[in-house]
Structures are given as C-alpha cells and as structure tokens.
C-alpha cells in the first residue's frame, strides 16, 4: 500500500461514461478510484508505443483491436516521418512497436532502422506466425542486429487451445518461430537477447498465477522442443474489440466485467503502463495506451496528432478511463 499513499483523490472524466451501460452491478472505474482515494495521472513518459496498423494475418477471438487480414489501416510513410521526428526530439527510454502484426506493414524495416538509434530499448511485439510466414527471415536478422526485445504472443502450450484462439496450424508455426529465434540467440542464457512470451486465457475468465504458468511453460517448452525464453507474462483479455463482441454474443460481458471489477487491486494503479507510456496510432494520433486507442479515447480526451507535439505529455495530466481499465488493475495488474 506504500505505492498507493502518494496518489490522491480521483475526479470523474467524461470518458469514464463510455459504455458503462454494459455494467449491471459493477461500479464505473472512476468510482473504484474514488473509493480508494486514488486518481490516475501521468508520471514521466518513458515509452513511446507505435501501432503500425490493424492489418494482421490472424483474426484472434480475444483481439481488443479487431485486427485481421481484412483491415487495411496501416501507418504510411508520412506518419512514420512524424513519429520518427517526435521520437528524435523526446528521446524516450523505450520504443515499443506493435500492431496488428507489425511485420505486415510494408514500411516496417524503415521504421525499425530509424527508430533503433533513438532509444536504449527497442521492443517489437509479434504474434510469431507473421514473423515466421516465410517472408520475414531478414526481419528476424534485423531485430537481432539491433538487439530488440521481442514480445511474442503464445497463449498456451496446448496446440488445440492455441489453434482454437488463433487459427488452425498457428501452434506449430509458433513453435518453429521460437526455435528459429533461439537459434539466433533469443531467450538463450548469456545472449543478452530478450524473448518474452505473453499468454492470454481463451475464454471469459482471468489468468492463473503468472509464476505457476511461467514454470509450466518453461518446463514443457524445454522438454518437448528445447525452447528457452526470458520471461512470461500472463494477462487478462481486455473487453474491447472482437473479444467484447464475443463476450456480448455469448452473454458473458456483464459477468466478465463484474469479475474484473471484483478483482480490482488499488496497489496496481501506481504501476499501470498508461502512467509512463504514450501510444501513437497508425494514423498518427495520440492515446494514453493501446487499449484507449482501441476504444477511440484520445489522450486526455483531446485529438492531438503526433506532428503537433513538441515534447512528452506533461506530468500530472489526467488519464482518460473507462470500464476496460479494470483489466489493467485486476490482481497483479497489466504493465
């Protein structure tokens, strides 16, 4: 609770009212903050997250962005120029490249080459199957050369479970991709090349213990496929996009939101990623996080293009919230 003590009382913002009609019994997120004498404000912004577009080779049921093969939104060269200029001016500690599947943006090599020198840590998020589609071996080499941290989606060590969430054959392609990354040194002890896995539940429930999940993944992947990785993060699915649609269609939305709210942990508020991250969308507009991007809630409730930013977001400015914020504050949180 020591972390929480430096936070002060919350005030409601208009964005807290987004889709609150979906709650039957759970309180709006802003009220949860108020009850614990908290407010969600920015600290120093150290991470620039770049969403390169919504095009993806998968159409996962749990995707909060509803990314997929038919989404044509991608970051264009002029927007890339603006993002690079912003990164060069601010010099963030971490640059986090995500999507969709960032591998499928035709300008991804240019973006990586230009962004890598601008921060101490370059992070690249991959669903593994796009990286291992036969067209991106040079991208693996490029990421290795820049010593990028790779954050890979790998929902389960069970093939049927993974394929049901992500598509037939995805598990085998992902295993092969992890083996190729290991061959390059990723995840191997002493290499300095960080390979982190992200596991998400397949249904309307919260993840099991991260420590236990990591232990099980590490043992099975090593024993069956000689695969090593650096860390595993087990996160709850965010009730937005395609996952929210599935929850509604399966009559699980209210139950899931109530479950998230019931696991609200005030100690997690101090460490949520939106306090130190700014997310730029494929079309260049700024958001407090990738989840607010999916919900269409602009940073601070104002539509600001990256080309208009002269520096990082100001410390102490409020972060827009809505019911999906319960995901990042349930249990041990979502960082």
Image (cartoon, rainbow, N blue to C red):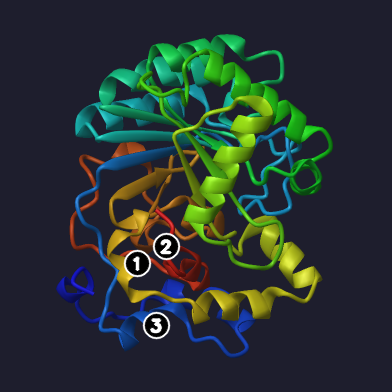
Q: Mark 1 touching mark 2, by CB under 8 A? A: yes
| Residue at 76%, 29% in the rendered image | 172
Is residue 70 shown left or right of residue 103? right
Is residue 137 among what the camera can see? yes
- Sort mark 1 into few (<14), some (14-19) or many (20+) by Cα contacts within 10 Å: some
Label 3 or label 2, whichever comes before in sequence order:
3
Q: Say which element carries label 3.
A: helix
Residue 39, image x, y percentages: 27, 74
Residue pictured at 55% horizontal, 39% vertical: 218
Decide which of tag 3 and tag 1 comes sooner along the chain. 3
**In the rendered image, the vertical position of residue 188 relative to residue 68, given as above or below:** above
Neighbours of disc 2 within 10 Å: few (<14), some (14-19), many (20+):
many
**Which sits earlier in the primary sequence, circle 1 or circle 2?**
1
> Helix or strand or loop: what does disc 2 sit on?
loop
Proximity of marks 3 and 2: CB atoms separated by less than 8 Å: no
* Residue underneath mark 2: 333
Q: Residue 120 vs residue 219: left or right? A: left
Q: Give the alpha-carbon distance from disc 3 to disc 1, as whole Å.
A: 13 Å
Residue 28, x across and y down, in percent? 47, 82
Query: Residue 287: x and y, percent?
Result: 41, 52
* Residue 111, image quadrant: top left
Q: Quick one: 2 or 223, which is closer to the camera?
A: 223
Give the distance between the C-alpha atoms of the residues marked 3 and 2, in whole angstroms.
15 Å
Q: Quadrant of residue 81?
A: top left
Q: How far apart are the alpha carbons under marks 1 and 2?
A: 5 Å
Check residue 32 in the rendering and tell me which mark sits there, or answer none: 3
User: What residue is pinned by disc 1?
Assistant: 268
């Amino acid at each position: 609770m020591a972390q929480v003590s430096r936070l002060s009382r919350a005030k409601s913002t208009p964005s807290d009212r987004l889709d609150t009609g979906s709650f039957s019994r759970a309180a709006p997120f802003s009220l949860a903050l108020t009850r614990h004498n908290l407010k969600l404000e920015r600290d120093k912004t150290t991470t620039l997250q770049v969403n390169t577009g919504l095009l993806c080779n998968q159409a996962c049921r749990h995707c909060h962005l509803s990314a997929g093969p038919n989404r044509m939104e991608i970051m264009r060269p002029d927007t890339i120029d603006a993002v690079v200029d912003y990164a060069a001016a601010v010099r963030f500690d971490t640059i986090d490249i995500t999507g969709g599947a960032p591998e499928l943006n035709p300008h991804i090599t240019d973006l990586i080459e230009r962004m890598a020198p601008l921060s101490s840590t370059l992070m690249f998020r991959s669903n593994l199957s796009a990286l291992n589609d036969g067209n991106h071996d040079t991208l693996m080499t490029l990421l290795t050369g820049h010593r990028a941290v790779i954050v890979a989606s790998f929902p389960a060590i069970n093939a049927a479970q993974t394929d049901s969430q992500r598509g037939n054959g995805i598990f085998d392609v992902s295993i092969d991709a992890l083996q190729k990354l290991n061959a390059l040194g990723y995840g191997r002890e002493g290499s300095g090349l960080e390979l982190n896995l992200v596991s998400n539940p397949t249904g309307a429930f919260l993840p099991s213990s991260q420590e236990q999940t990591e232990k099980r993944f590490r043992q099975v992947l090593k024993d069956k496929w000689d695969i090593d990785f650096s860390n595993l993060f087990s996160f709850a699915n965010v009730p937005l996009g395609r996952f929210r649609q599935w929850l509604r269609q399966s009559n699980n939305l209210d139950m899931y939101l109530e479950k998230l709210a019931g696991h609200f942990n005030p100690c997690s508020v101090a460490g949520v990623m939106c306090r130190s991250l700014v997310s730029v969308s494929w079309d260049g507009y700024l958001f407090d996080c990738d989840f607010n991007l999916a919900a269409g809630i602009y940073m601070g409730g104002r539509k600001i293009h990256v080309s208009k930013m002269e520096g990082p977001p100001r410390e102490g400015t409020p972060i827009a919230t809505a019911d999906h914020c319960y995901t990042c504050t349930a249990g041990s949180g979502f960082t």
